[in-house]
Image (spheres, rainbow, N blue to C red):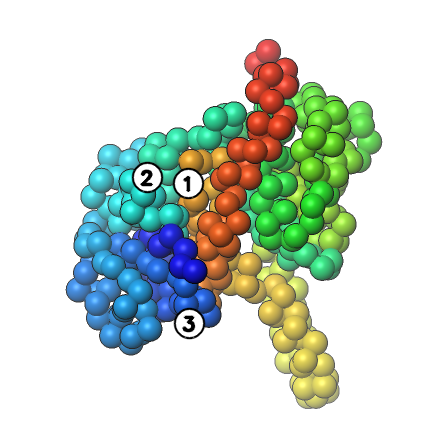
Amino acid sequence: MSLPRIAVDAMGGDEGVRVMVEGAALARRRHDRFKFLLVGDEARIKAALDNHPNLRGASEILHCDDVVAGDEKPSQALRRAKTTSMGLAINAVKTGEAGAAVSAGNTGALMAMAKLALRTMPGIDRPALSALLPTLGENDLVMLDLGANTDCDARNLVQFAIMGAAYSRIVTGREEPRVRLLNIGTEETKGTGDLQAAAAQLRAAAADLAMAFDGFVEADKLGRGDVDVIVTDGFSGNIALKAVEGTARFVADLLRRAFTSSLRSKVGFLVSRPATELLKHHLDPNNHNGAVFLGLNGVVVKSHGSASAIGVANAVAVTARLLEENLTERIAADLARLGADSLRSVPKAAE
C-alpha cells in the first residue's frame, strides 16, 4: 500500500539537488511504496532524475528557484515562505498535497515556517525538535528538545515527555518507554523548580501516559541504553547533542591517529578493522539522520545539512515510518488521555 507522498525540499542542504534526489531515489529502492513531491529548480531536478529512473515515475516536480540561505535569519525567511523551496514543501503538507515534508535547509527557518503554516496541536504550547541518538542498548534514544526552545517551563517539559514517549513507541516498539528528565543529578532535590514540577506531574500521570517515568538522568548516561526518552529544554539539549557529536569525532580522530602512528599500529589496525568499522558505522550521523519537529499538525523532518545520500534516505525512511504509524494521532490520543485540565495544572515559569 502506498503512503501519502513526501514533499522534499530539493534545494536545501550543503549539496542541494544532487544529494537530495539521490537520497530520495535510494529510499525509493528500499521501499517502493514511497512517492515524492520534489520542490526546487525543475531543470536541475529533471537532470538529476535522469540518473534515477526508479524515482522519476514516483515523483512530481513543483518548480521553485528561490532558496533559503543557510545563514538567513528565520524572520527574513518567513517573508519568502510562499516563494522558497522550503516554504512550498511545508505548504504542501498544509494543503494536503503531501503527507510530510523533509528538508536539509536552515533549521531555524524550517521551524519558523512549519510552526506558522501548520500550527501546534491542541494541548501543545510549543513544538520540539527531537532526534535519535545511538546507545549501547538495543534501541536508539529519543531526545528532545534539541534547540527549538531555549527557555522552557515545567508545562513545556511535560508536553515534550508526552510527545517523546509517543515517538519512542513507534521507533522502539516499547509499550512503556523509559522516560527521564535531564538534570545535574538524580536526587529529587536537584535541579530547577521547573524540572522538579515537571517530574512531580509526570510521576503522577505516568500510568495514564503509557510511559515508565523515574525522575532524572545525568548527561554522562546518555549513551548507556538504560533510557528510551530524555527530555530537556532546547538550550541544554543542543549543548548536550553537540558535546556527544564532538566526542564521537574526537574518538574517531584519536583512533585514526593511533593506528597510523607506527608500523606496528598499522598492523594492529588491520587486525582490529572489523571492530573499528563497526564503531565507525555506529557513530556515523548519517545512520541516525532525521530530526523531527514534534507537536505540529503535520510531520516535518530535518535532515543534516551535510548528510550524504544515505543520510537523506534514512531521513525519508523516518518520515515514512511516522506517517505509517500515525505519530500525530498518537500524540493527540495521549494528550486527551492526560486531559487539558491536568496539563493546565502544571505551573508555568512565570507563575
Residue 219 visible in this rendered orientation of the protein = no
* Residue to which mark 1 is pinned: 298
Q: Position of residue 196 (x, y in %)?
A: 72, 24
Report x, y in % for residue 142. 62, 47
| Residue ID at (71%, 27%) | 205
Amino acid type indicated by mark 2: Lys
On screen, residue 151 versus residue 231, left or right, reads left
Quarter residue 156 falls in: top right
> What whole-number distance in Å separates the C-alpha atoms at marks 3 and 2?
27 Å
Q: Quadrant of the N terminus?
A: bottom left
Residue 125 vs 303, above or below: the answer is above
Q: Residues within 10 Å of mark 1 (few under 14, many from 20)?
A: many
The residue lying toward the viewer, choosing from 273 and 300, is 300
Q: Earlier in the sequence, mark 3 or mark 2?
A: 3
Mark 2 sits on what residue?
94
Kindly check if marks 1 and 2 are in contact, taking CB atoms under 8 A apart as contact.
yes
Which residue is painted at 37% across and 69% down in the image?
25
Q: Please tell me whether mark 3 sits on a helix, a strand or a loop.
A: helix
Residue at far right of view: 187
Residue at 51% from the left image edge and 28% from the top image edge: 124
Tag of residue 29: 3
Quarter containing the C terminus: top right
For marks 1 and 3 on the same chain, the one whose residue lies earlier in the sequence: 3
**Which residue type does callout 3 highlight?**
Arg
Q: At 70% across and 24% down in the image, what residue appears? A: 201
Q: Is residue 114 visible?
A: yes
User: Image height check: is 147 above or below 124?
Assistant: below
